Image: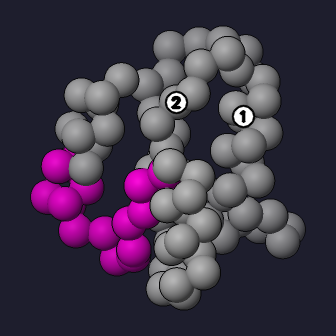
Amino acid sequence: MAQGDVDLLIVDYHLDNDENGVDLVADIRAQRKDDLPVLMLTANYSLELKQQIRDLGYLLMHKPVKPMKLKTTLNHLLSKS
């Protein structure tokens, strides 16, 4: 992945082939010079995942995502960058 005009990452936690969004974000960040804000989406309500996402400094939203909450969250993330 090349440097490009990216304002934030919106990533699903559960991906195909036993991969997850946390690992994907780590791979993307390893290839970039900036630390993009991350919004992690998941249907997983475990406290362990919630804590892991918090420790990484990402925001977490649980599915199903409500449109207005998503809009507010995106505005918040984009205003910080």
Which of these two is toward me, 21 or 50? 50
Q: In the rendered structure, does residue 67 fall within the stretch colored magenta?
A: yes
For the point 54% across and 71% down, which residue is it? 51
Considering the image in quadrants, where does the C terminus appear?
top left
Amino acid type, label 2: Leu
User: Disc number at residue 28?
Assistant: 1
Q: Is residue 63 above or below residue 6?
A: below
Q: How far separated are the C-alphas under marks 1 and 2?
A: 9 Å
Few, some or many C-alpha atoms within 10 Å of disc 2 (few <14, some 14-19, many ≥20)?
Answer: some
Of all residues shown, which one is farthest toward the bottom?
46
Q: Residue at x 59, y 75 (%)?
A: 49
Tell which of 45 and 3 is nearer to you: 45
**In the rendered image, which quarter is residue 61 located in?**
bottom left
Tell me where residue 64 appears, x and y as whole percent: 34, 76
* Spot occupied by residue 63 in the image (x, y as percentages of width and height): 39, 75
Residue picked out by circle 2 = 36
Q: Quadrant of residue 44?
A: bottom right
Tell me the magenta residue range.
Answer: 58-72
Secondary structure beneath dot 2 equals loop
Badge 1 amino acid = Ile
Upstream in the sequence, badge 1 or badge 2? Answer: 1
Dots 1 and 2: beta carbons under 8 Å? yes
Asked if residue 39 is positioned above or below residue 20 in the image, the reply reads above
Q: On the rendered image, what quadrant is the N terminus found in?
A: top right
Whole-percent x, y for residue 38 in the image: 49, 44
